[in-house]
C-alpha cells in the first residue's frame, strides 16, 4: 500500500462571530484557490487528521473565513483553531511545463552559477516582498524566489540553480 503524501494549503484561525465561522490563512496561489477543494483534511497539533467539508466560505477585507459542515456555534468552531488544512498530493492539478509545486522542491540541492553548493531546500517562507527558500547547508540561507535569482530547476537531478553570491 502506498503512503499518502500531504500538501499543506493553509491554517484555520480564531472563530468569527457566534455561528461557527473561522478565520483562515490560505497558502495557495491565488489565495482563493483553497476553496477549489470541497473537502479538506485537518491536521491537529497531535498529528491526527480528519476530513471535513466546507459548508460556506467568504472573503472580507481582512481575508477569508469558512464554516465547516456541521459546525454551527462558536464553541464547536474553537476545536479547529490552529489546525492545518491539507489535501492529498494526488488532489493537486497537474503543473504546466516549467512549473513546480514548492512541496516537490523540498530536499533539492541549491547551487549558484559559480557551482558553489549552498545546501538543500528545507522549506519556503512567504515574505512581504516575495517568497524565499530556506536552504540548509553549512549555514542557513534565505534566498529570494524571483525570476532574477532562480535560474533553473532540474527535477531529474533534484537541483535548483540560483544567481546568488556565495558571500552574501
Image (tube, grey):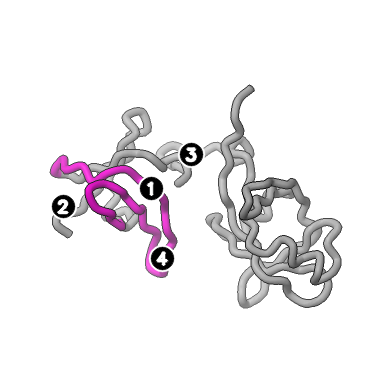
Report the residue marked by disc 1.
122
Asked if marks 2 and 1 touch (Cβ < 8 Å), the reply is no
Judge whether 166 appears above or below 19 on screen: above
**Is 113 one of the magenta-colored residues?**
no
- Pinpoint residue 38: horizontal percent, then vertical percent: 74, 49
Picture quarter with the N terminus: top right
Secondary element type, mark 4:
loop
Residue at the image point whose x is 20% and y is 45% from the top: 112
Q: Residues within 10 Å of mark 3 (few under 14, many from 20)?
A: few
Q: Quadrant of residue 4?
A: top right
Ranked by sequence position, the earlier of labels 2 and 1 is 1
Quadrant into which the C terminus falls: bottom left
Of tags 3 and 4, which is closer to the observer? 4
CA–CA distance between discs 3 and 4?
25 Å
Marks 4 and 2, Cα distance to the nearest angstrom? 22 Å
Residue that label 2 marks: 166
Locate residue 23 relative to residue 143 in the image: left or right.
right
User: Are circles 3 and 4 on residues that touch, CB within 8 Å?
Assistant: no
Q: CA distance from mark 3 to mark 1?
A: 24 Å
Which label was assigned to residue 96? Answer: 3
* Front tag of 3 and 1: 1
Label 3, label 2: how far apart the Cα atoms are: 31 Å
Q: Which residue is mark 4?
A: 127
Amino acid at each position: 500500500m502506498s503512503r499518502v503524501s500531504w500538501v499543506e494549503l493553509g491554517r484555520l484561525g480564531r472563530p468569527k462571530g457566534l455561528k461557527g465561522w473561522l478565520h483562515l490563512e490560505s497558502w495557495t496561489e491565488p489565495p482563493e484557490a483553497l476553496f477549489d477543494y470541497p473537502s479538506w483534511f485537518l491536521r491537529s497539533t497531535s498529528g491526527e487528521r480528519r476530513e471535513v467539508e466546507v459548508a460556506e466560505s467568504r472573503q472580507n477585507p481582512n481575508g477569508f473565513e469558512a464554516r465547516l459542515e456541521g459546525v454551527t456555534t462558536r464553541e464547536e468552531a474553537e476545536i479547529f483553531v490552529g489546525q492545518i488544512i491539507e489535501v492529498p498530493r494526488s488532489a493537486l492539478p497537474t503543473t504546466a511545463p516549467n512549473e513546480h509545486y514548492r512541496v516537490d522542491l523540498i530536499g533539492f540541492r541549491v547551487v549558484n552559477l559559480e557551482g558553489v553548493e549552498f545546501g538543500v531546500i528545507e522549506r519556503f517562507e512567504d515574505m512581504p516582498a516575495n517568497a524565499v527558500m530556506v536552504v540548509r547547508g553549512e549555514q542557513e540561507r534565505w534566498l529570494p524566489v524571483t525570476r532574477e535569482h532562480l535560474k533553473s530547476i532540474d527535477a531529474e537531478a533534484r537541483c535548483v540553480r540560483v544567481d546568488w553570491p556565495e558571500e552574501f
